[in-house]
Image: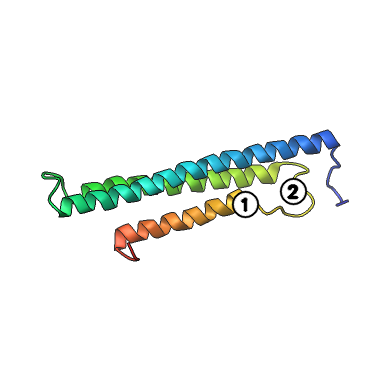
Amino acid sequence: MIVGTPVLSTSDTLAAQRTWLASERTLMAWIRTATSMLSFGFSIVKALQYAVQEGMLKGVRAESPKSIGLFLIILAIALLMIASVQHWLFARSLPGVIGRGRRWDLALTTAMLLIILGLLTLANILFKVGPF
């Protein structure tokens, strides 16, 4: 037992674990939402850029698709960052769940990887860097 760490009853420990898992599910829902927004934003940019270049969309400025896609991508990255920080702070505050060493948080790791992917996508669109 670690000094200064309260000992929780079995029911309290299980309740804390259920609460932690609920927080994980919430973060996973944010990951799904951000993934949809990222992929939709990137698809809008690329599809409408192609349509404007081919002359299929007369009267549409060339920057319009880029603006819409960038908005979705930036929004997805920002929301996922906020959700990740909220999850991390909440998980740290739970008693008895992380008391015996740090638990590897798969949802938080996935969120961080998706944030990196979103930033790479943003760099691709803004600076035309990468294979797309």
> Is residue 54 toward the left or the right of residue 116 in the image?
left
Above or below: residue 118 compared with residue 75: below
Q: CA distance from mark 1 to mark 2?
A: 14 Å
Q: Residue 12 occupies which quadrant of the picture?
A: top right
Pointer 1: what residue? 106
Task: Kindly identify the residue that appears in the image at 16 percent across and 48 percent down.
Answer: 61
Q: Which of the pair 15/7 is nearer the observer?
A: 15
> Is residue 41 toward the left or the right of residue 14 in the image?
left
Q: Which mark is nearer the camera, 1 or 2?
A: 1
**Position in image of residue 38 (x %, y %):** 40, 48
Looking at the picture, which amino acid does disc 1 mark?
Answer: Leu
Task: Kindly identify the residue that appears in the image at 39 percent across and 48 percent down.
Answer: 39
> Is residue 63 toward the left or the right of residue 78 in the image?
left
What sort of colour scheme is used for the picture? rainbow
Mark 1, Cα crowd under 10 Å, few <14 / some 14-19 / many 20+, is few
**Position in image of residue 46 (x %, y %):** 28, 53
Pointer 2: what residue? 98
Looking at the picture, which amino acid does disc 2 mark?
Answer: Ile
Quadrant where the image shows the C terminus:
bottom left
Mark 2, Cα crowd under 10 Å, few <14 / some 14-19 / many 20+, is some
Task: Kindly identify the residue that appears in the image at 59 percent across and 50 percent down.
Answer: 108
Q: Residue 10 occupies which quadrant of the picture?
A: top right
Q: Which of the pair 82/24 is nearer the observer?
A: 24
